[in-house]
Image (spheres, rainbow, N blue to C red):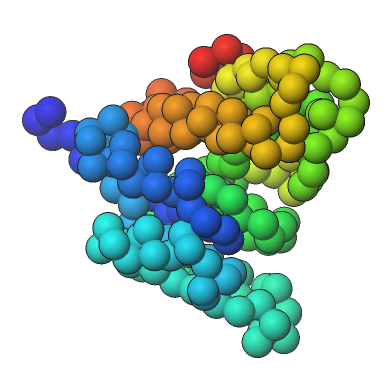
């Protein structure tokens, strides 16, 4: 596309990196018309960093306990993202809460994927909570990140049926498959300027994507 400048974005990770790998694959296959500028992790030995290194993507890893405050390491993160030219941030299994200060630096430019149909089952045990509640339907949600926990405006959702014989492992696998399909599509929409957020309203909200 003549004159098209690819957007650069950061991906924040803490775990095995399955969503990161889905995003890397989508970039390499041209599904995401953008570029990962840096992968940031609060766990220097996490498997996700291996995914980024194998793809020759710059990484920045830190250990929070080595800093005197969250603000101290978040300033470093913001600096690394700026040096990499990142225009927005994709949280992909990043298990550390971002401070209001950091969120303000990237206001309306941070997205997250959560393993439930928000506002149902927020928090870190969403899949188990859905099973224990006897829910028949769950899924995943891509949303903007604000100062709360899983409270930002919803961009898109993908439904997943909970079968009678589903346990935590089987349902987790089903939701991960849905995430790997949905998240790259939404990242691409951001790269193509197809999603905006004004005040509390998401302008390109697709509940069943």
Write the residue at 13% across / 34% down.
Answer: 3
Image x and y of residue 167, in percent: 74, 32
Furthest residue in direction left, as rendered: 2
Of residues 165 and 28, the one drawn nearer to the viewer in this rendering: 165
Say if residue 141 shows up in the picture.
no
Of residues 133 and 187, the one drawn nearer to the viewer in this rendering: 133
Of residues 18 and 76, the one drawn nearer to the viewer in this rendering: 18
Image x and y of residue 33, in percent: 27, 35
Write the residue at 23% across / 35% down.
Answer: 29
In this rendering, position of residue 133 left or right of residue 153: right
Quarter that holds the N terminus:
top left
In this rendering, position of residue 26 left or right of residue 96: left
In this rendering, position of residue 96 left or right of residue 25: right
Q: Is 139 above or below relative to 34?
A: above
Write the residue at 43% across / 65% down.
Answer: 49
Of residues 168 and 72, the one drawn nearer to the viewer in this rendering: 168
Q: Is 202 above or below relative to 92?
A: above
Image x and y of residue 56, in percent: 25, 63
Write the residue at 61% across / 79% down.
Answer: 63
Say if residue 168 shows up in the picture.
yes
Image x and y of residue 179, in percent: 53, 32
């Amino acid at each position: 596309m003549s004159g098209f400048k690819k957007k650069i974005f950061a991906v924040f990770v803490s775990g095995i990196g399955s969503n990161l790998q889905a995003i890397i694959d989508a970039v390499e296959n041209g599904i995401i018309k953008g570029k990962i500028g840096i992968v940031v992790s609060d766990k220097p030995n996490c498997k996700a960093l291996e995914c980024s290194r194998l793809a020759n993507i710059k990484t920045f890893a830190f250990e929070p306990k080595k800093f005197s405050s969250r603000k101290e390491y978040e300033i470093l993160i913001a600096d690394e993202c700026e040096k990499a030219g990142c225009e927005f941030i994709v949280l992909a299994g990043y298990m550390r809460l971002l401070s209001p200060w950091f969120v303000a630096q990237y206001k309306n430019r941070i997205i997250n994927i959560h393993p439930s149909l928000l506002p149902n089952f927020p928090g870190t045990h969403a899949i188990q909570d859905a099973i224990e509640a006897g829910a028949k339907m769950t899924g995943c949600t891509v949303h903007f990140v604000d100062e709360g926990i899983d409270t930002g405006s919803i961009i898109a959702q993908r439904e997943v049926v909970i079968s009678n014989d589903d346990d935590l492992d089987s349902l987790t696998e089903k939701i991960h498959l849905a995430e790997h399909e949905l998240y790259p599509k939404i990242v691409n929409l951001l790269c193509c300027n197809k999603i905006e957020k004004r005040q509390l309203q998401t302008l390109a909200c697709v509940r069943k994507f």
